[in-house]
Amino acid sequence: MRHLIEPMDLSSQETDELLDLAGAIMEDPAKYAHKCDGKKLATLFFEPSTRTRLSFEAAMLELGGSVLGFSSASSSSAAKGESVSDTVRTVSCYADIIAMRHPKEGAAKVASLKSGVPIINAGDGGHQHPTQTLTDLLTIRSLKGTLDNLTIGLCGDLMFGRTVHSLIRALLRRTNIRFVLISPNELRVPDYIREELKTNRFEFAEVDRLEKVIGELDILYMTRVQRERFFNEEDYVRLRDSYILDKAKMDLAKPDMIVLHPLPRVNEIAVEVDDDPRACYFKQVLYGKFVREALILNLLGVESC
């Protein structure tokens, strides 16, 4: 039995094979429509979610399986004080695989130690979000044709952004990736990420203005400033509008640059950008469903990859 707690749980080869399987599902979804007949996915979401939870549920349903679970801690026994360990041990009796989101870092790892079925980390606080990383990798590979030789700008909340942390670590396994880290000083990437970049000898730059560097980028990965990660409302209000991608900034970018965003968007990407062919964040959502289908098949041992 395997779990997926962070992107590095999969080797480079396993990641590539998983992306290949996701691509195969995209090409011929009917071939996989009954692979999970009789299987049940439990979605345990102790923190609000739209895309991640529904994409997991859509993925399992399209594979022929069924879904149970809850969408907030308040609608589970966590509201009565039940521990994550006890919840997971209970749900393991009902389901074949669990996707879990929790606001506390490390909660998914704790769950994996107690679960009788595979655990997929669907986001744990500001720490890791491996299925979003797989989604990002599939999107980049599908749209750019490669995961190597790219300059990627990551913009916004780089301190608390678990999607940013996971994506950087996954791309450290690739060749000739240059990172441009765009954030206010208060929201720079954590020291451990910076040290990993240095240790692995990847080129990176830290800047505070998007318009200075947007013309260099092959990929721009936007993130929102996350109100739920702040202890101080004044700090959130001060930083929330630090970076807004609009048509004027897009005019400075390469014709083939792509814009990604893990969503939800607040106002960091102007609605006027949505009609630009380089805006690929809604395509990214669709890729997420296929990559989660591939992951469910893999962890259940239904389809080798």
Image (cartoon, rainbow, N blue to C red):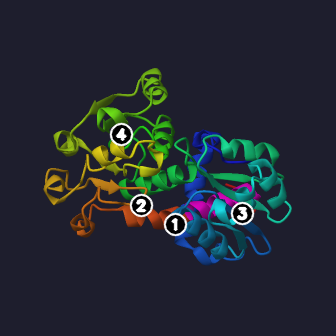
Label 2 – label 4 distance at C-alpha: 28 Å
- According to the image, label 1 marks what residue? 50
Residues tagged 1 and 3 counted as in contact (Cβ below 8 A): no
Label 1 – label 2 distance at C-alpha: 8 Å
Label 1 – label 3 distance at C-alpha: 18 Å
- Is residue 26 in the magenta section? no
Please state the horizontal and vertical placement of residue 275, each as a whole percent of the image: 24, 70
Please state the horizontal and vertical placement of residue 70, each as a whole percent of the image: 67, 66
Q: State which tag comes first along the sequence, 1 or 4.
A: 1
Q: Secondary structure at mark 2?
A: loop
Q: Nearer the viewer, mark 3 or mark 2?
A: 3
Residues tagged 1 and 2 counted as in contact (Cβ below 8 A): yes
Q: Amino acid at mark 4?
A: Asn
Q: Secondary structure at mark 3?
A: loop
- According to the image, label 3 marks what residue? 76
Can residue 164 be spotted in the picture?
yes
Q: State which tag comes first along the sequence, 3 or 4.
A: 3
Quadrant in which residue 217 is drawn: top left
Q: State which tag comes first along the sequence, 1 or 2.
A: 1
Q: Nearer the viewer, mark 2 or mark 4?
A: 2
Q: Secondary structure at mark 4?
A: loop
Q: Amino acid at mark 3?
A: Ser
- According to the image, label 4 marks what residue? 149
Tell me the residue at 63%/70% (across/down): 57
The local crowd at label 4, few if under 14, some if 14 to 19, many if 20 or more residues have their Cα within 10 Å, is few
Q: Is residue 168 left or right of residue 259?
A: right
- Is residue 291 in the magenta section? yes
Label 1 – label 4 distance at C-alpha: 33 Å
Q: Which residues are magenta?
A: 290-301
Can residue 1 be spotted in the picture?
no
Please state the horizontal and vertical placement of residue 269, each as a whole percent of the image: 28, 58
Q: Secondary structure at mark 1?
A: loop
